[in-house]
Amino acid sequence: MCYNIVVMKLTDLKYVSEKREKDFNKLNIFSVEDLIRHFPRAYLDLTRTDTIASAYHNDVILTLCEVVNVEFNRYSRRPYVRALCRQGDYLFSAVWFNQPYVAGKLGCGQYLFYGRVQNKLGLGASMVNPTFERADSNLRLKGFVPVYPLAGSLTQGAVRMAVKQALERVSICSAIPYALQKKYALADLKSAYAGVHLPVNADCALASAERIAIEEYFLLISAFKIIKGDSRTARTVFYPVTAAEVKSFCSRFPFELTAGQREAVNDVFSDLRSPTPMNRLIQGDVGSGKTAVALAGIYMAVKSGHQAAMLAPTEVLARQNAAIIQRYFPDYPSAFLSGSTPAAQKRAIKAGLGDGSLRIVCGTHALLQGDVEFADLSFVVCDEQHRFGVGQRAALTGKGGTADTLVMSATPIPRTLTLIFYGDLDVTTIKDKPASRQEISTSIIPERRYGDMLAYISSEVKKGTQAYFVCPKIEGDEEGSVMSVTELYEELSQKMPGVRLGLMHGRLKDKQKDEVMSAFRAGEYDVLVSTTVIEVGVDVPNATIMVICSAERFGLSQLHQLRGRVGRGDKKSYCFLLMGSDSDEARQRLAVLKNNSDGFAIAESDLKLRGGGDFMGTRQSGRSAGDIKNLNFPVSAIFTAKSISDDAFSGGFYTASLREAAMRKYNKLKDVILN
Ligand code: ADP
Ligand code: MG
């Protein structure tokens, strides 16, 4: 993409004050160019109205009704406004909690309401916190409307207005060679941006998102091609270790390697004999036994007389690795080095690595960015768990030069996406798991069984087990369609008397998070009510129940990771999926999870069902791959981008400017991941 020469500041736009600019900054939007890449996370179809009578519980609808009475009330000190409404012969109420000003804005007459319908047996229907406007004004509640991620005091209206202006001011053109744009019948890129932000209907939004995704993937795939081409230097490090020696090392494990592990060890062994340095990804679900493969690789290095390093994304995991290394390599001096290592010890370790007396080092990725020098570092294992690590790998290349690199990922990425995220690597996938794993029983809980489920969980936790309740948001969203973690916490306090509840979310300070987590681990809470911050790395074996609220909001792979928080001890574990809004599509998706315990199969289905952008918007790390996190596009966009990139390279379109655009994209992505 190319822009006006001057990067426009957000405050150059009308109605964007410095305060509003700060809110945009919170969303990583710093320029007008960033703004047009702030894609809607959903669209509201306000092109048609529904009737309350035909709506199901939890449906979010637009409806036209007559307000006949408005009253202001308090319920246990909570102020609320209730409007009695009529639609034909049908009477219902609309309720606004904690928004007393609504009483002043709402009068009798015809209104458009947009919001969630609650259909309580015996109580009839009501709408909760609906957005409203007078039917004769019909200003906002119409058309096909984008819904943006928000921060601070930003409103949808403010974002829409800013984006609209930005689209008018920024010039956008494609980096795809014109001949190839024609060959693939690609739409104009600028129109595609307009089509995503201001679509006339769903088809337009989808086609536009696909066009943008093709552009993004084209650049990314091209960048990987460039990097891969550039980094194919000749091997300078050799490994005299024999296959028999490796085999004998592997016999030290207290288990037989699975077929997948054996294949991975073989791949590493032959990579170390190939003419160029190894750059391999071992992809395997959590628990597939990647550590054993890494150990075998490290053995090949140290037995051949070289040094090896093993990196982990967190200090806890790095320490865990260091202990394993000591156990399997008692004859080779090894060390653990991290930011928290005392200075004197750090100096000694650095000296040992520099003169080669230390043979193996474990640490976090920071190890490679510091001033640590090695006598003969030949083999680097990078255990990135839930991270993409593109950026970390770039740092690695800078350091090790020609070191052989083994990246291990627990993120089950479908083959299609491997191409994107690991385009610079060769890939081995471990598909099988050690035979001893316990299945977690997964069920989809319909609304009417919610009470029963709470009663069951109350009685189970009183017997000593623990449970997680996870919901997608810290705060409710504008449509009021998702319960926030604090609302859930309050609801559970009332509905589960005598159960000790902990509350956890990303807004807590690190220290508070630690305290809540330690208290839960120590059994001081029975139930932890949390956002997805618990997703990565939490290990409380006594927790056997995982409840996921508004489960349809999550990517399947993310649900799979969340579910993986239970089933860690020897007790039978359960995962309950609650649906915030009921649709066939949501049921179909959740059924995939219910019927599957294999992360790869789940990831493939997820990709097919939800399209690529969404998959990436819900990455395990909570980070997204670059900017296209909110775009929902068909996966075919990735394949198209790959074909175009192949054509560009074979057709000699690979110009300096294309190369530059691709590397700029790559570097931007790298920053997103590193910071
Ligand atoms: P991950 O792939 O998630 O890193 P680990 O390497 O930590 O998995 O292995 C998870 C557990 O499974 C460890 O306790 C490990 O000892 C065990 N394990 C690994 N391979 C096998 C195997 N082939 N048979 C039985 N247990 C195994
Ligand atoms: Mg691991």
Image (cartoon, grey):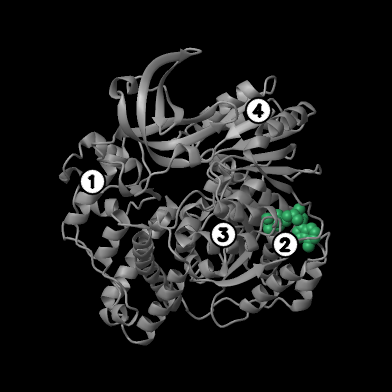
Q: Nearer the viewer, mark 1 or mark 4?
A: 1
Please name whichever residue, 285 or 202, is drawn nearer the observer in this view of the structure. Answer: 202
Local packing at callout 3 (Cα closer than 10 Å; few below 14, some 14-19, many 20+) is many
Amino acid type assigned to the residue bearing label 1 in the image: Ala
Q: Which residue is mark 4?
A: 519
Query: Which numbered disc, 1 or 2, marks the residue closer to the eye?
Result: 1
Residue under pointer 2? 292
**Residue 170 position within the rendered picture, expressed as x and y whole percent measured from the top left:** 19, 58
Which amino acid does the dot numbered 3 rest on?
Answer: Asp
Mark 3 to mark 4 CA distance (whole Å): 35 Å
Q: Nearer the viewer, mark 3 or mark 4?
A: 3
Q: Is mark 1 within 8 Å of ligand 2?
A: no
Q: Which residue is mark 1?
A: 162
The image quadrant in which ligand 1 is located = bottom right
Q: Secondary structure at mark 1?
A: helix
Q: Nearer the viewer, residue 162 or 123?
A: 123
Residues 76 and 13: in front is 76
Whichever of callouts 3 and 4 sits on the residue coming sooner in the sequence is 4
Q: Which residue: 54% across, 75% down? A: 277
Q: Position of residue 220 (x, y in %)?
A: 40, 68
Disc 2 or 3, which lies upstream in sequence?
2
The residue at which mark 3 appears reads as 606
Contact (Cβ within 8 Å) of mark 1 with mark 4: no
Q: Earlier in the sequence, mark 1 or mark 4?
A: 1
Q: Is residue 257 above or below residue 83?
A: below
Closer to the chain start, of discs 1 and 2, is 1
Q: Is residue 123 above or below residue 319?
A: above
Q: CA distance from mark 1 to mark 4?
A: 45 Å
Q: Please provide percent x and percent y for residue 165.
A: 19, 50
Mark 2 vs ligand 1: CB below 8 Å = yes
Query: Left or right: 590 with respect to 54?
Result: right
